[in-house]
Amino acid sequence: MSLHPAVYAVLFVLLAPVFGGLLAGIDRITSARMQSRVGPPLLQPFYDLGKLLQKDARQVNPLVEPLLLGHVAFMAATGAMILGGTDLIFTAFVFALAALFLVLAAGSVNSPFSFAGAERELIVLLASEPFFILMLAAICKVTDQSTFGGVLGSAVMVAPKLPGMLIAFSFVATIKLRKSPFDISTSHHAHQELVSGLTSDMSGRLLGYVEVAHWYESAILAVFVILFFNWSVPLGLLVFAVAYGLEVLVDNSTSRAKWQLVLRSTWVVTLLFSGGNVLALFLIK
Amino acid sequence: MGSLIVFLVAFPILAGGVLLGVRNGNLRNAIVVLAGLVVAGASIATAVTFGNGNAVFFDLPNGLTLGRSLLAAEIAIAAFVVVVSIQNRRILAPILVLGQLATSLYLELAGKMPEVEPGRLFWFDRLSVVMVLIIGIVGTLICVHSLGYMRGFHRSSPMIKGRRTIFFALLFVFLGAMFGLVVSNYLPLMQVFWEITTICSFLLIGYTRTKETTGYAFDALNMNMLGGLGFSIAILMLTGQPDGLDLAKLTAGPATAALMPALALLCLAGLTKAAQMPFSSWLLGAMYAPSPTSALLHSSTMVKAGVFLLLRLSPAIAGSNLGMLVAFTGMLTFLFVSLVGVTEQNTKKVLAYSTIGSLGLIVGCAGLGSPELIWAGVMIIIFHALAKGLLFLVVGTIENRFYTKDMENFDALLSRLPKVSVLALTGIAGMFIAPFGIVVAKWTAIRAFLDIPGWQGAALLVIMAFGSSLTIFYWGKLLIKVLAMRPVTEHERTIEKRVSRFEWLAEITLALGVIVVTCFLGVISEQVVGPYALATFPDTSQSFLHVDPVMLATMVVALLFLPALALWAARHERYDLADFYAAGRPVTSGGVMGMALGGSRTVSLRNYYLEGVVNGRLAFRAGSIVCGSLLVALVATGMVAR
C-alpha cells in the first residue's frame, strides 16, 4: 500500500461522504433501537440528501449559499490535506476555518434563531479548538513526524503514550459530532428551545450542503482516531465505531447543556487531560 | 551610502517642520501627498540599494560627525517633558526623564562615553529593509489617509480645537525618527530616536487635549520613559564593556554573564514599547486618539520599535534564563489579552488587544530565538503592519460615518457600506482567517515549541493552543457583524459616497498590499526573511525556508474568498428572496417582526461576550500581575547572572 499521498487525498474527497452518510444511517438505526423503534433503512440519509438537493432552496440573502459551499469545500480540503501529506498541525487551523464558514453563513442571515445558533457554534469552536491543536501537536511530538503518512509509518505507537489525549478526544468529539449534551448550536432533537439553531434559515439544497459537510467532519474525526492507533488502521476504525456507539448512547440519555457548562467543562477537560498528557510527554521524553 | 539614510531620516522631519507652518488645507494636502511620495520612494530606493546583500555598516556622509548633537537632543527632550509636566502637574515623567539625562550627562562630563568606532554608526541588513519598507509605505499611506479622516473628525467633533498643523507635523517627525531607529547600530544614537518616538506618541495621543486623553497620553509617556530609563542605565552599564555600545557586536552571539544586566534592561525597554503586560494599558488608552494615530502606533511605528529591538537582541538572549522569561512574558501576554479581547465591545479596543497579542507572539519568538522563530517573528511584523494598519483606517472611516466604535453598531455593514466592508474583510482575513501569514507564523512557533525540552515547552504549547483559539471568537463575532445583510434605506446608500478619496487611496493600496504580500510569501521568505533568520543564527539548516505550495494555495484562496464573495454579493443585492424564520411570526423586510399581541418590533441582535465564564477585567489584572512578576524576575535574573 504505497500509493502517492495525492491519491489518498482524492479518495478522501470521494469516499468520505459515503462513510459519513453510512455512519449517519447506522446512527439513526441505533438511536431508534434505543428508543424501541425500528428506525429507517441504512441508506436513508442518502435518500434524504437526494431529496434535499432536488428541492428549491429558500434563500434569505445572496451570501448563505456560497458560504456554505465554502464550508463544504474547506471541510473536504481539511481531510484531503491531512491524507495528502500536509503538515498535521497546520491542518488544525484549516479545520477551524472550515467550521467558521458555517458560523458566517448562519450569522449573515441576521435573524434571531440563526444568529443565536451562529454565536453558539462560535462558542463550541472556541471550546474545541485548543484540543485539536494540542492533539495534533502531541501526535507529532510522540512520533517525531509531521504528516499523516509519517505517523502511520512510525514505529512508535501513539495511543499508549497519549491516554489523556484520548479521554479528552471522546469529550470533544461529542461537540464535533453534534451530540447531546453538547449539541447547543444545532438541534437534532425536536423538543429543544433553539428550534433548529444555526440551520433555521437553511432549506433544500442548502441544508444538503450542511449535511455533506458534517459527513466530511465525521470522517475527519475517524482519521484522527486512526492517527492514535497508527499501528493498525482496522483497530483505529473499530475504536472509532465503538466510541461512536457510546456517543449515540450519551446523545439519547442526556439533555442539552447550557453553553456556559459546555465551554467550562471542555476547557477544564482539555487543560487537565490534554495539557497534563502534553506535560508528561515533555517531562519524560 | 550614508547620505541616503540621512535623507530618509531628515526629509520627513523637515517636511514635518514645513507642515507646522501650513494652515491652508489644499496646500497641506499637496505637501502631504508629495512628501509621502518622496518618503515612500526613498524607502524603496534604500531597500533596493542595500537590500540584496548582507549587513552593511557605515557612518554619516563626508565629514559630518555627531559631535554633541545627541546630548543636545536629550537635553531638549528632557526640557520639553519637564515643561509639559509642570503645565499638567505631573511628577513621574520629569523624574524619569531627568534620570535619563543624568546618566547621559554623567557619561559625557566624566568623559566615559566611548567614541563610536569609525564606520559603525549605522547598521543596515535585511531586517532594516523590512522595517524601512513598512515605515516608508504603510506609514505614509496613513499620513495620506489622515487628510481625509481629520476633516471628518473635526466635523463630527466641533468642540475639539483643530490643531492639524501640529498633527501632520508629528506624523512625519515620527516616521523620520522610526527610520533612524531601525538603522542605528550605535546604541546612544538609537536611544535618541527611541525617545523621539515616545514624545511623538505622547503628543499624538493627547491631540484632542481633553482631560481623558491627556491622562492617557501621560500614561504612555510614563511607561515608555520607564523603558527609556532602562535603556539609559543599560547604556551606562555597557560603556564598561568592550564593544558594548555596538549593537551588532553585542548581539553577534550568546551574551556573556557580564552583559546580562544591561540586556535585561534593554529587554525591559523593548517590552514597554511593545505594550506587553503589565505595560499594555498605555496602548489601550491610545485608542481614544484619532484613528490614524492608532493605525500609525500599531502598524509601522512605536510598538514595532519595541519588537524590533527584541528581535535584534534575540541572538544574545536566546537559550538563557533571560530569554525564557522574555518569551513567557510575551506568550502569557498573548493568552491574557486574547481572553480580555473576547469580552470587549469597542472595536478599536478589540483591535488593540489583537495587536498586543500579536506582539506577544513576536516577543515569544524573539525570547526563544531560533532561525524558524526569528523567521516567524519577522513574518508577523510584515503581515500585522499591513493588515492592522488597514483595519484601523477602515474602522476610522466607519467611525466617521456612524459616530460609533461599538462593534454592535457595525451590523449589516456589508449592506450599508459595501466597499468599506470588502476592505474590512480583507484586513480581517489578513489578520486571522486561518491559513495566512500570522497562522503560518503560529504554526512555525508550535513546531519550535515541540523541540523545547521540559515543562517550558509543554506550557508554551498549551498557552498557544488556548490563546490562538480565543482569537477566533472575537474575529468571528466581528465577521458576523460585517457580513450580516439587511435591506437599507435610500439615505443609508448615500453614506459611503462621502468617504474621501484620500481614505480610499490609502485603504485600497493597503488591501492590495495584503493580497500581494500573501501571494509572494514564498519569494519574501526565500529572498529576505529567510536569509535574515539564517544570518542571525548561522549554524542551522535551511529546510524551513520553502513554504509548502499546498499551504500557500490554501492561504491565497482563504484570503480572497470572503472579500471576493462580499464584492459579488454587494453587486447582486437581492432581498426579495425570502424572509427569515421567526417561529411563525410575520416578518417584513428589514427585520420587523409582528408581535403576538399586536404591534411590531425591529429585530436587534447582540453578540455573546461570555459573561459569567470569562471576566475581562479580572483577566487583565491577572495578566498584569503575572507578567509583572515575570518582569521583576527578568531584571533580577540579569543582576544575578552578573
Image (tube, grey):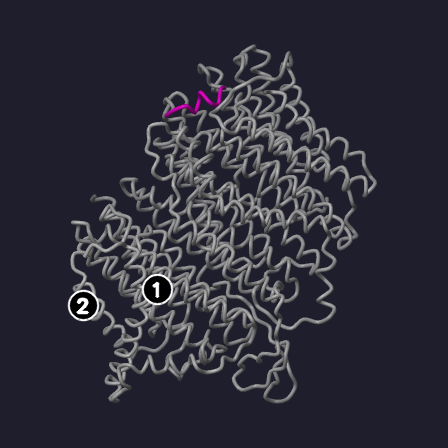
Q: Check disc 1 and give the amino acid type.
A: Ser
Q: Are marks 1 and 2 in contact (CB under 8 Å)?
A: no
Position of A196 relative to A147 (above/below): below
Q: Position of residue A189 (x, y in %)?
A: 37, 81
User: Residue placed at 64% from the left, 38% from the top?
Assistant: B201
User: Does residue A224 belong to the magenta stretch?
Assistant: no
Q: Position of residue B586 (x, y in %)?
A: 59, 86
Q: Is residue B277 visible?
A: no
Q: Position of residue B405 (x, y in %)?
A: 63, 57
Q: Which residues are magenta?
A: B246-254
Q: Which residue is mark 2?
A: A238
Question: Left or right: B134 with respect to A222?
Answer: right
Task: Describe the element under mark 1 as helix, strand or loop.
Answer: helix
Q: Residue furthest top?
A: B111
For disc 1, the neighbor class at 10 Å (few under 14, some 14 to 19, many from 20) is: some
Residue B84 occupies which quadrant of the picture? Answer: top right
Q: Nearer the viewer, mark 1 or mark 2?
A: 2
Q: Check disc 2 and give the amino acid type.
A: Leu
User: Residue placed at 61% from the left, 64% from the top?
Assistant: B414
Q: Which residue is mark 1?
A: A265
Position of A47 relative to B487 (above/below): below
Position of B265 relative to A90 (above/below): above
Q: Position of residue A246 (x, y in %)?
A: 23, 73
User: Residue placed at 58% from the left, 39% from the top?
Assistant: B300
